[in-house]
Image: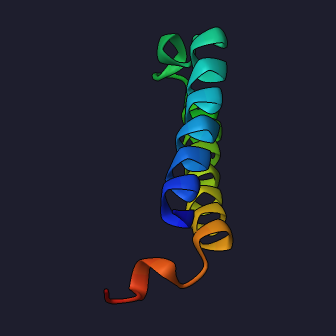
Amino acid sequence: MSSFKGILAVAILTAIVAWGALELNVGEYHRDPLWALGTSVAFLTLLITDVWLFFAIAKDEPFKWE
């Protein structure tokens, strides 16, 4: 059950960041190097945070065999 909670937390965080990116219209600035760099750093940070959040919530449950 904690794996489900971890996936749900990751999905909620990712949805919030995606909503923020849409609100900032980051797709309109993909040719600007500074915006592209900032967006890529933000998405990489999101990815690392998502992985950390999942394992912080799920702990070692995903690795246990039934």
Q: Name the foreground residue: 23 vs 6.
A: 6
Q: Is residue 54 above or below residue 11?
A: below
Q: How many marks?
A: 0
Q: Name the foreground residue: 56 vs 32.
A: 56
- Residue at horizontal 50 percent and vertical 10 percent from the top: 28
Residue 54 placed where, x, y %?
58, 64
Q: Quadrant of the C terminus?
A: bottom left
Left or right: where 24 falls relative to 6: right
Left or right: where 33 falls relative to 42: left
- Residue at horizontal 60 percent and vertical 19 percent from the top: 19
- Residue at horizontal 50 percent and vertical 52 percent from the top: 7
- Residue at horizontal 64 percent and vertical 43 percent from the top: 42
For residue 56, say whether it is visible. Answer: yes
Q: Is residue 2 above or below residue 40?
A: below
How is the protein colored in the picture? rainbow
Q: Is residue 24 above or below residue 41?
A: above
Left or right: where 24 falls relative to 14: right
Left or right: where 42 falls relative to 30: right
Q: Name the foreground residue: 66 vs 24.
A: 66
Residue 8 placed where, x, y %?
54, 45
**Quadrant in the rendering for residue 34:** top right
For residue 39, say whether it is visible. Answer: no
- Name the residue furthest left: 66
**Quadrant in the rendering for residue 18:** top right
Q: Is residue 26 above or below residue 35?
A: above
Q: Name the foreground residue: 26 vs 23.
A: 23
